Amino acid sequence: MSETIYEIKNLQKYYEINLGLFKKPKIIKALNGISFDVKRGEVLSLVGESGCGKSTTAKLILKIEEPTGGEILFNGEDITKLQHHELEEYRKKVQIIFQDPYSSLNPRWKVGSIIGEPLKLNTNMRDIEIKERVLYLMEKVGMHPDWYERYPHQFSGGQRQRIGIARALALNPEIIVCDEPVSALDVSIQAQVLNLLLDLQDEFNLTYIFISHDLSVVEHISDRIVVMYFGDIVELKSVDDLFKNPEADYTKKLLSAIPTIKD
């Protein structure tokens, strides 16, 4: 049985919306107390429409935001209680690939600087060592070494996402949160990037938390799928079981929305 890397217990996130001077603030419940685990080496996908809470869950796991309640246990330790050095070490182990490869890369920086920045900030590596590491990662994601001195605007969407993937790999993370990593790409490029992610997972022993609104995207890469709806988990199953035996009405709705080719 695979080792559990994350245990999410009764996770809650509420946002307070100020409606004016004499009005009572409105409470938005983004997460209503969800619980699930993540096994080491798996691809666990969080799926649902916009507003279901999947991105909020990712922000809490990444420590971008703090939960209203509940626990996030990483290798048995509650990350909501981490301080200073412990938090820095945790953030090295958990990286993110952003949704939009156009806005997530600094347009003023060359590729080598973009990929190498995490190493510059978080290690004692010398410049020559950083360059060697960056060129190695560029090769692993299918980028030519000549691209080291180029700027993001010189690349296509798929190529830019490869830059983002290389950057996420820089610090040898254990987990990568993939936040809709192919939704901004042409359909013809999506499969290439998904296959690359699977190849890298095998080579670098990665665990993926994959966020998507589209079940057809996660069908071929997921081990298990968490279906979310308005801050709740309505279904959590292996990918095969989910597609063959969906139980929740919302899951059936998502499945019915997948395009099919008819004779």
Image: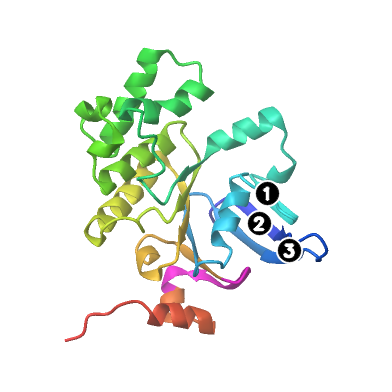
According to the image, label 1 marks what residue? 73
Callout 3 crowding tier (Cα within 10 Å): few <14, some 14–19, many ≥20: few
Name the element at disc 3. Answer: loop
Give the number of the disc on residue 200: none
- The residue lying at 46 percent from left, 82 percent from top is 252
According to the image, label 2 marks what residue? 8
Looking at the rendering, the stretch of residues picked out in magenta corresponds to: 229-240
Q: Tell me residue 95's x, y (percent).
A: 50, 41
Q: Tell me residue 210's x, y (percent).
A: 46, 56
**Marks 1 and 2 in Cβ contact (< 8 Å):** yes
Mark before the other along the chain sequence, 1 or 3: 3
Residue at the left extreme?
Answer: 263
Q: Tell me residue 148's x, y (percent).
A: 27, 26
Name the element at disc 1. Answer: strand
Mark before the other along the chain sequence, 1 or 2: 2
Please give left or right for residue 186 compared with residue 9 in the image.
left
Most frequent secondary structure within the magenta stretch: strand
Quick one: 231 or 138, which is closer to the camera? Answer: 231
Mark 1 to mark 3 CA distance (whole Å): 35 Å
Callout 2 crowding tier (Cα within 10 Å): few <14, some 14–19, many ≥20: some
**Please, what is the three-letter code of the amino acid marked with disc 2?**
Ile
According to the image, label 3 marks what residue? 19
Quick one: 197 or 62, which is closer to the camera? Answer: 62
**Please, what is the three-letter code of the amino acid marked with disc 1?**
Leu
**Please, what is the three-letter code of the amino acid marked with disc 3?**
Leu
Mark 3 to mark 2 CA distance (whole Å): 32 Å
- The residue lying at 45 percent from left, 51 percent from top is 178
Name the element at disc 2. Answer: strand
